[in-house]
Image (cartoon, rainbow, N blue to C red):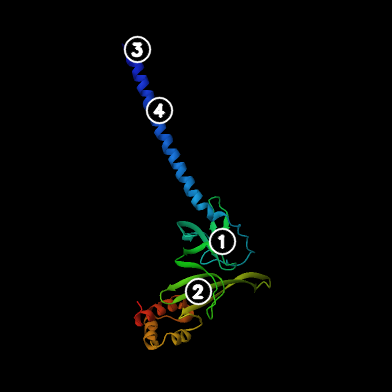
Amino acid sequence: MMRISLLLYFIFGCAQLFAQDVERQQLIDSSAVGYLRMADRQSALYYGKEQEGHLRALNHPYLKDDQYAKARLSYRRIIYPETMLRFDVNRDELVILSPDQRSIVLFPENVDFAELHGYTIIYFLRDNLPGCPSTGYYLLLHSGKYKVLEKQTATLMQKDTFSSAFEQHYVLSVNYFLNMDGVYYTIRNKKGLLKLLHPYKKELKRFISSHGWQFRHDAEKLIPLTVGEYEKLSGWQ
């Protein structure tokens, strides 16, 4: 009788362990399948060419930071809530860090938008509207009845140092565009902006002054917020 009890105990114990092993394996398999599905979904991001290195310079040619940062990306109409991106404004390339630590240049025509460093980056295609800027990546500063775009460009230059040796550095240039009533206008100063936003020139002057903005230093927020205020005054919002 004792032998039978021990045998039954051994059989049931083995069965229980076997069941636990099966459950554990099913969990592993399920996790593996989920990972493979996720990897396959993201694999389209890593098919591009690897980014070429830059020449040594005193500064970097990237938007805000040369290090990768977490970003929200829409690529071929699929949202990737957490990707590691950086934006090269010298070569006009949006670059993603792959799982194996490679720098991959995204195909621009597949980029719907990217949210990086608090900016919305879009790939803009030149059209036939008057004043339309060239094709490339732009920062979308405002998107209402009217659109405000910012174009950053970093150009590699030479710098004459005190040691009389020439060192390379990047010089950043910024241009702003306002799409208004089927025409793109290049905004170079406050006067030019207010000229377009009639008949509320006085109201908008007070709006700008109330915030203490100076076009030279604050254009990136002055232009889109002033355009937004113009839309309110016009009854569009």
| Above or below for 28 versus 206 | above
Residue at the (33%, 13%) spot, across then down: 4
Type of amino acid under label 2 = Glu
Q: Nearer the viewer, residue 147 or 209?
A: 147
Q: CA distance from mark 4 to mark 1?
A: 49 Å
In this view, the mark in front (1 or 2): 1
Q: Position of residue 113 (x, y in %)?
A: 48, 64
| Residue under numbered circle 1 | 107
Point out the tag, 3 or 1, that comes first from the N-terminus.
3
Check disc 2 and report the residue beneath it.
Answer: 150
- Report whether 162 appears left or right of 224: right
SS under mark 4: helix
Residue in front for this viewpoint, 27 or 190: 27
Residue 18: mark in rendering:
4
Q: Which of marks 2 and 1 precedes in the sequence?
A: 1
Disc number lying in front (3 or 1) = 1
Earlier sequence position, callout 4 versus callout 2:
4
Identity of the amino acid at label 4? Answer: Phe
The answer to whether residue 147 of the structure is visible from this angle is yes
Which circle's residue, 4 or 3, is located before the other in the chain?
A: 3
Mark 1: few, some, or many residues within 10 Å (few <14, many ≥20)? some
Mark drawn on residue 3? 3
**Circle nearer the N terminus (2, 3):** 3
Task: Please provide percent x and percent y for residue 166.
Answer: 67, 71
Q: CA distance from mark 4 to mark 3?
A: 22 Å
Amino acid on which disc 1 is placed = Phe
Q: CA distance from mark 3 to mark 1?
A: 72 Å
Asked whether, in this view, residue 45 is left or right of residue 202, the answer is right
Query: Between marks 2 and 3, how big is the CA–CA gap?
Result: 84 Å
Tag 3: amino acid: Arg
Cβ–Cβ below 8 Å for labels 4 and 1? no
